Image: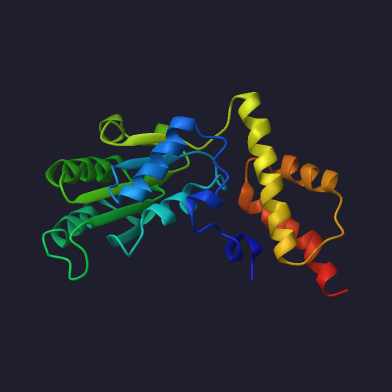
Amino acid sequence: MMWSEKYRPTKLAECVLSHLQPSEATFLDVSVESGMLPNLLFFGSPGTGKTTIATILCDDEKYSVRQFNGSLLGKEDVAKIGRMLTTRSLFHENRCIWIDEVDGMTHDGQRALRAMIEENVTYISWIFTANMRSSIIEPLQSRMICIDCSVSELSKRRLHIDGIVKRCESVLQSERVTNYPIDDIRKLVELHYPDIRQTLNQLQVRYARSLAA
């Protein structure tokens, strides 16, 4: 099994969030604890934790969750989602619609989505993930709380790398791998930064063989 999936965080406390603004990390904690999600857009380069955070927030014990791939959604598909929302959920009063890769939708599809959000403002939370914020129309962005998962400031980058290194150490310890130079782990993290998923994949390639030795 891929380590990037085997050790995917199931709680926000397990995520490496040092690249976010402190207020954003606190806000996500409060949202999870309260069970009241606003409309959220997570954007940034692949492997930076967008999908993991969205998975944690879209707790199917609290919400009736429907997930869609934005790259496969057209305007007509969005209309079908709208009709689906008119029916009552058998499990939870509150609903969560999670659209991954929303930047892959056409602008017509995004405009239809924006209209739907305006019509359903009380009991539905919308969670979007995207690689390119610039590919999302402004009227749709304005209806979301946008959280940048990319890293620009050097100080935050160092903190983020430190957090990923600790995460790698935790994975190795769970796999009972003990003979690893910490400098090698840091170099691996820096090589693939900020892609945490690829970092864990390469960590597995490098150290899983020691388990069979």
Q: Quadrant of the N terminus?
A: bottom right
Q: Can the viewer see residue 44?
A: yes
Residue name at image x 38 percent, y 52 percent: 57
Residue name at image x 17 percent, y 46 percent: 116
Residue nearest the observer in this picture, 208 or 198 = 208
Where residue 60 appears, as percent x and y from the top left, is 33, 64
Residue name at image x 49 percent, y 55 percent: 11
Where residue 133 appears, as percent x and y from the top left, is 42, 34
In the picture, measured across the screen, residue 89 lies left or right of residue 103, that is left
Residue name at image x 33 percent, y 35 percent: 145
Residue nearest the observer in this picture, 173 or 132 = 173
The correct choice, above or below, for 211 with respect to 140 in the image is below
Where residue 142 appears, as percent x and y from the top left, is 28, 31
Residue nearest the observer in this picture, 141 or 10 = 10
Q: Quadrant of the C terminus?
A: bottom right
Answer with the quarter of the image where residue 110 lies. Answer: top left
Q: Can the viewer see residue 103?
A: no
Where residue 196 appears, as percent x and y from the top left, is 63, 48
